[in-house]
Amino acid sequence: MTMPKERGTRRAGTHVTSVDVAALAGVSQAAVSRAFTPGAPIAAETRRRILDAARKLSYVPNSIASSLTTRRTNMFAVILGNMNNPFYVKLFKILLERLQSQGRQLLTFTVEPGANSDDALMRVLRYQVDGIILTSAQLSTRMTALCHDRGIPIVLLNRYIPGSDVSGVRCDNIGGGRLIAKAFLQAGARHFAVIKGDPRGSTSQDRLRGFAEQILEEGIARRNILELEGQSIYEGARLAVLRAFQGKGQPVPDAVFGINDTMAMGAMDALRGEMGLRVPEDVMVAGFDDIDEGAHWPYRLTTVRQPIEAMIDEALALLQPDAPGRPIEPGIDRTIPGELIWRDTIPRPKHG
Amino acid sequence: MTMPKERGTRRAGTHVTSVDVAALAGVSQAAVSRAFTPGAPIAAETRRRILDAARKLSYVPNSIASSLTTRRTNMFAVILGNMNNPFYVKLFKILLERLQSQGRQLLTFTVEPGANSDDALMRVLRYQVDGIILTSAQLSTRMTALCHDRGIPIVLLNRYIPGSDVSGVRCDNIGGGRLIAKAFLQAGARHFAVIKGDPRGSTSQDRLRGFAEQILEEGIARRNILELEGQSIYEGARLAVLRAFQGKGQPVPDAVFGINDTMAMGAMDALRGEMGLRVPEDVMVAGFDDIDEGAHWPYRLTTVRQPIEAMIDEALALLQPDAPGRPIEPGIDRTIPGELIWRDTIPRPKHG
């Protein structure tokens, strides 16, 4: 085999086959295939020798060609619902790193918050993917059936769709809402505002539900909980707080619960910035998710930490290949408890 | 054609072909193909009728099968360098939305800041992509030659590699560094600290260079510019400031320039939080990028806005299919000026 070189690479790199690599590395063609298959059994030293040979020959296995025979592409798709919420960015980052470390690739889509994911899913199906991870809320039964027909598993991350056959993993949002309510109540709060996210999303509904249940159980009236629309984003929450409470607005409540951290931070900036109030002295604030920014000095936000790593592990475990034509069964709905993270936006309970 | 339905979808959806869709929509098979090809000429009404028919039949065109004949997959790859910097997340989000609106998909990879992108590129090449967008810094000539051999264009976004044949688009980082220096000088600053990012990245080097040049031209000594290592991240900058200036450290300078906004924000939180200083009364701060969080109430950070939309437009325009075997030519290095955004972390110049 002649190897005309230019800049250290072989010009006709695209025509090198696994036979050439096997010959140079002194192994079988099957070993070359195993070296490029994530999780396939092969000795580390053999794999290294094969990768060295592949590098020297500029050999790149073609996943798409091989997928036509194996029906596996090692490619997954994620549909992201709200990239303006840093929580979903963090979720995406950890998911991407996890899949990459397993030798898998990620095809990425985004849909507007609250928008239906059908169009994105339709586009995903034009590619051969081994599984689909959805963080957006709306999805038609027709689309999930279409994926099912093709044997492509879908899993919902931080979501569920009641009555659906799609499995999902989420934080215990009802329990988390209760944790925040308990913390506010312990600190003496009796009047509350809740800044909600996407009204059609299970996440916002469940957090509000747990929060309200806990407060009602304390004998406090439902009218003491004011609901505001924050559209799941910082700016939406900031403006909702200003509209409700600034100037001749309603009295400022004892405590404000942002259904997610980014909205809690928007609320804090409105309360302290435009309205000149102190947190927690004049008004307590709490969020949900535990995004990195909430821990920073200007916020020190008390929140519920979502178990992102555990949620991703569970989601990927649920993403097993589906047998095409298998009867549709009810999906698995897995919840993992969140953890209350005490920082400085609710006075801490006194011990002893 | 019989259509046994279950949940409104056809069970054998995978075997529907464009012939079935053409028949139902009353159009030619070629029209069906055009309806699913981004940018292909077809009347909006005809396209809508075809998409309706496709939906009814659960027809999904298979991009991979068609790519074997057209050699185009409509799939692009992006390699992200530092997902802990919100600027790159914003860049990614806008890129993703742009490509999606053009009917293109995005395969996403990430590499550690400062790490070499060769392994990620090697994995990209296992898939047929129409182009590669790189935001990470390090890349070997061997890998770019390998892409060139396969006719796959690469473009660097917010980067350049001196002497490389890879084209790139970036902000005028030297000019932007000068804008920050001018603003500090106008406000009377004479002693400076610069918090640097990845020492091997052109971005950090160029911003520091422009900044320092402007200050030296004012007749101020180079030793008045202290350089700190912030590793491109919030926490790195926060700790660098504390190590340098807290307690018995060096005197706090008049002005601190974070090479990116997230580091400027980390510096501000160290200066105000742990050290109890006021910004800008005790120390001025500026950043670079104009991330959304920098505009929020606790920061109101003066910065240089990167022209993200224009940079992405230019990058996509440079990502034209390459002729395999074409001689390698020097890459195009396009710079777009940034814009100084005055907020509250440098006293504003007095007019009149």
Image (tube, coloured by chain):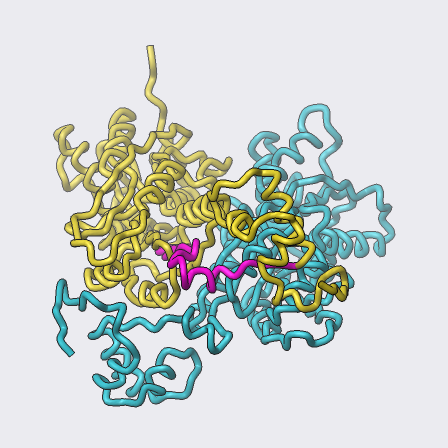
Chain colours: A cyan, B yellow
Rendering coords of residue B129 (x, y %): 38, 58
Rendering coords of residue A171 (x, y %): 65, 63
- Tell me if I can see residue B98 in this picture: yes
For image coordinates 28% across by 64% down, the residue present is: B118
Side (left or right) of A221 relative to A276:
right
Q: Nearer the viewer, residue B110 or B48?
A: B48
Establish if B242 lies above or below A243: below
- How many badges with numbers are in the image? 0
Q: Nearer the viewer, residue B224 or A193?
A: A193
Q: Which residues are magenta?
A: B58-83
Residue extending farthest to the top is B352
For the C terminus of chain A, the image quarter is bottom right
For image coordinates 29% across by 26% down, the residue present is: B187
Side (left or right) of A22 relative to B312:
left
Rendering coords of residue A134 (x, y %): 60, 59
Establish if A107 lies above or below A195: below
Q: Nearer the viewer, residue B187 or A330?
A: A330
For the N terminus of chain A, the image quarter is bottom left
Side (left or right) of B205 relative to A341:
left
Task: Report which quarter residue B216 is drawn in.
Answer: top left
* Magenta-colored stretch includes residue B277: no
Establish if A194 lies above or below B106: above
Q: Nearer the viewer, residue B95 or A197?
A: B95
For image coordinates 27% across by 31% down, the residue present is: B179
Task: Report which quarter residue B308 is drawn in.
Answer: top left
